[in-house]
Image (tube, helix red, strand yellow):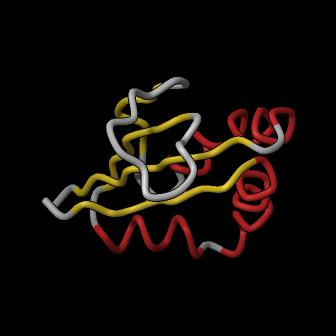
């Protein structure tokens, strides 16, 4: 059953995050994932920590596919770009 994941990123290095964005769609697609919606300036109603500078709603075919995307050793360099470019929180939302 398809699942959604919500990604929130507080940007710390625009250039590095830009390099991540160039590779992100291909990395997601490797595990059946895609970007459903993204906002580079999300309206934040409440934040427990840093307000995210951007937010994205991702879709994966299963929870296992979402986990496989994040844990794929061949994508370590892609995830490293995201983590160097900002502080991110990615939460899977069950259907």
| Residue found 50% across the figure and 47% down from its top | 8
Q: Is residue 50 left or right of residue 42?
A: right
Q: Quadrant of the C terminus?
A: bottom left
Asked whether 92 or 40 is in front, the reply is 40
48, 35: nearer the viewer: 48
- 38 left or right, relative to 13: left
44 over 95 or under it: above or below: above
Residue 24, given in percent of the width and then of the height, sits at 63, 43
Residue 94, above or below 14 = below
> In front here: 50 or 12?
50
Q: Is residue 22 above or below residue 31?
A: above
Vertical placement of residue 74 versus 26, above or below? below
User: Residue 86 placed where, x, y %?
Assistant: 72, 50
- At horizontal 81% and vertical 33% (from top left) the residue drawn is 14
Task: Point out residue 4 in the picture as x, y percentages from the top left corner.
Answer: 28, 52
Residue nearest the observer in this picture, 49 or 65: 49
Q: Position of residue 48 (x, y in %)?
A: 43, 58
Classify residue 21 by image quadrant: top right
Residue pictured at 32% horizontal, 37% vertical: 45
Number of numbered discs overlaid on the protein picture: 0
Horizontal side, residue 4 vs residue 70: left or right: left
Q: Quadrant of the N terminus?
A: bottom left
Determine the image quadrant of residue 5.
bottom left
């Amino acid at each position: 059953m398809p699942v959604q994941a919500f990604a929130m990123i507080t940007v710390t290095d625009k250039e590095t995050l830009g390099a991540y964005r160039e590779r992100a769609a291909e990395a997601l697609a490797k595990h059946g994932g895609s970007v459903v919606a993204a906002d580079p300036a999300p309206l934040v109603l409440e934040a427990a920590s840093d307000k995210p500078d951007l937010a994205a709603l991702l879709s994966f075919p299963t929870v296992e596919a979402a986990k496989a995307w994040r844990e794929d050793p061949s994508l370590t360099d892609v995830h490293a770009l995201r983590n160097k470019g900002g502080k991110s929180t990615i939460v899977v939302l069950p259907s």
